[in-house]
Image: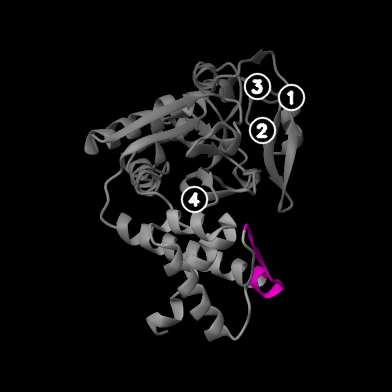
Amino acid sequence: MASSHWEGFDEFVAVAESGQFTAAAERLGVSSSHISRQIARLEERLQTRLLYRSTRRVSLTEAGQTFLQHCQRLQDGRDEALRAMGDLGSEPKGLLRMTCAVAYGERFIVPLVTRFMALYPQLRVDIELTNRTLDLLHEGMDMAIRLGRLQDSRLVASRLAPRRMYLCASPAYLERYGRPHSLSELARHNCLIGSSDNWPLQQDGREIAQRVQGNWRCNSGQAVLDAALLGVGLCQLPDYYVQEHLRSGALVSLLEAHQPPNTAVWALYPQQRHLSPKVRQLVDYLREGLAGLPEYRTPQEPA
């Protein structure tokens, strides 16, 4: 499209939004006569009146109201394109606010974010570790790390790593109490309960919540793992807790045909057409960093 076809767009939007030629002129840093001239030429090209003019106020015609909506979208798209091009070579900088669950954040996310910050000295990070699900939009957060299944459809989700749940026990426990061969046999075993006594499992191709019971409960994954290693009972934990112990034989995987469908570790951020360099590059860094950790090797992989 010839450049002349765009003439008057910015002037028209400025007048429509401010309601005055003088205010529009101040906003754009030009003269009122320039504003008036550009809009007159625009109306002439369109063969349509866009504005009703009076000595005090300017108002939109019906055609002007429709045209304004299109012009504003065009302005947004143009500004978005310019920001995207400007950010191509930009380094992360400014403040990045993010949140993550406490145990997972302390063990995996915070060390990676700290190393990321060392690469970009102009970046500042504020990390809130909490097991509450914060509202990113209300709290003004740039990003959240979430585990498992996602609920908030208002956010964009980027997969960082797999998350597979394992049902397992120590050889000492199995030698003493036997190995369960079906879901119904779980009722005869002492199950180490973490944050929930409903364990996600799979039966006949669908995910179910299996109610379990036991004489031990703690809302810490590490504490559940320690109890399982000591032979206190069965546990269900994510891969990053148990992979090392499955490889060494300190834990044995059970009822593998009933493992629940894989979920994931996610980076979530508010819906935006253009992602800032600090968020985009941190998401990529976290994905690569998690993939390189020994906790994310499968039990069959060499250490």
As measured in the structure, the alpha-carbon distance from the residue carrying label 4 to the one carrying label 2 is 37 Å
In depth, the one of 188 and 176 nearer the eye is 188
Quadrant in which residue 193 is drawn: top right
Residue at mark 3: 193
The number of numbered discs placed on residues in the rendered structure image is 4
Measuring from the top left, give residue 163's x and y in whole percent: 52, 42
Q: Where is residue 5 in the image (x, y as percent from the top left)?
A: 45, 81
Mark 4 is on which residue type? Ser
Q: Nearer the viewer, residue 107 or 17?
A: 17
Q: Which residue position holds label 2?
A: 180
Give the extent of the magenta segment. 56-65
The C terminus: image quadrant: top left
- Asked if 6 appears above or below 85 in the picture, the reply is below
Q: At numbered mark 2, what does the secondary structure look like: helix, strand or loop?
A: loop
Identified by mark 2, the residue type is: Pro
Image mark for residue 153: none
Position of 213 with respect to 47 (left or right) is: right
Q: In this view, does 86 lie above or below 240?
A: below
Name the residue furthest top.
215
In terms of sequence position, does the residue under pointer 4 or pointer 2 come before the other?
Answer: 4
Do labels 4 and 2 touch, CB within 8 Å? no
Q: Distance between the residues labelled 4 and 3?
A: 30 Å
Secondary structure of residue under mark 3: strand
**What residue is disc 1 on?**
188
Q: How crowded is mark 1: few (under 14 residues within 10 Å), some or many (20 or more)?
A: few
CB under 8 Å between discs 1 and 2? yes
Kindly tell me whether residue 250 is visible in this rendering.
Answer: no
Q: Residue 158 carries which label?
A: 4
Decide whether residue 43 is among the magenta residues: no
